[in-house]
Amino acid sequence: MPDRKTYHHGNLRQALVEATAVLIQETGPLAFTLSEAARRAGVSPAAPYRHFKGRDDLLEEVARQGFVDFGERLERAFDNGTPRPLTAFMRMGQAYLDFAVERPGYYMAMFESGLSIAGNADLLAASEGAQRVLIDAAEIMAKRLPPERRPPARMVANHIWALSHGVVELFLRGKPGGRSPVGPSEMLESGAIIYLRGLGLIGE
């Protein structure tokens, strides 16, 4: 646990974000308190107000940082579609699942906290940045088709995002869900391939 000198080193804001991400992982995005985040960061209950207006402001910053990291992971995974767009696209799916497992507190803040993303310009930009990676990947996938047959890239991105999120919610992080003869990674990959094939984005 960070001690009380953390603030004097100028790291209180980030210490509070990290402490909150751990709290969310432990208790969920609706149960954590600002005072407990302060205690975990090793500062007084009043100290967080030097950096955040309140609990929701801190939660939004956790989500924002999560979306930034999330988008960067997706971008690295796709790697401009190398060596093949489909291979790269499947890597993005695995990156999505890995993020949910490795950074659950941030993931829950992003997707399970009930935040109004549109109400925070920085959070909205981070969210749209992550989505843009998926949209750009979908556009690259569609280049094999003539322009008049290409599905809307944003629609494809949203469908893949929803499929990935569904796998996380049902089969990862210890949540109860339906039984499956395959693991989450295989489930996501097979679902994505069926979807993309149906759109003609990949061959038989």
Image (cartoon, rainbow, N blue to C red):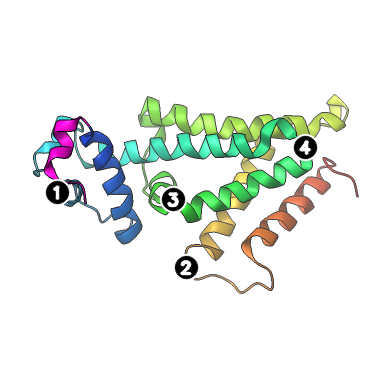
Give the quarter of the image for residue 122. Answer: top left
Whole-number angstrom distance, CA of label 3 to CA of label 2: 14 Å
In the image, residue 120 sits, relative to residue 69, either above or below, namely above
Residue type at the position of mark 1? Ser
Q: Nearer the viewer, mark 3 or mark 2?
A: 3
Whole-number angstrom distance, CA of label 4 to CA of label 3: 26 Å
In the image, residue 85 sits, relative to residue 103, either above or below, namely above
Q: Name the residue under label 4.
A: 85
Whole-number angstrom distance, CA of label 3 to CA of label 1: 22 Å
At x 30% / y 60%, what residue is drawn? Answer: 27
Q: Which residue lies furthest to the right in this view?
A: 204
Residue type at the position of mark 3? Arg
Q: Is there any visible trace of residue 140 in the rendered image?
A: yes
Q: Mark 1 points at which residue?
A: 35
Q: What element carries label 3?
A: loop
Residue type at the position of mark 2? Gly
Where in the figure is residue 200, as x and y percent of width and height? 85, 42
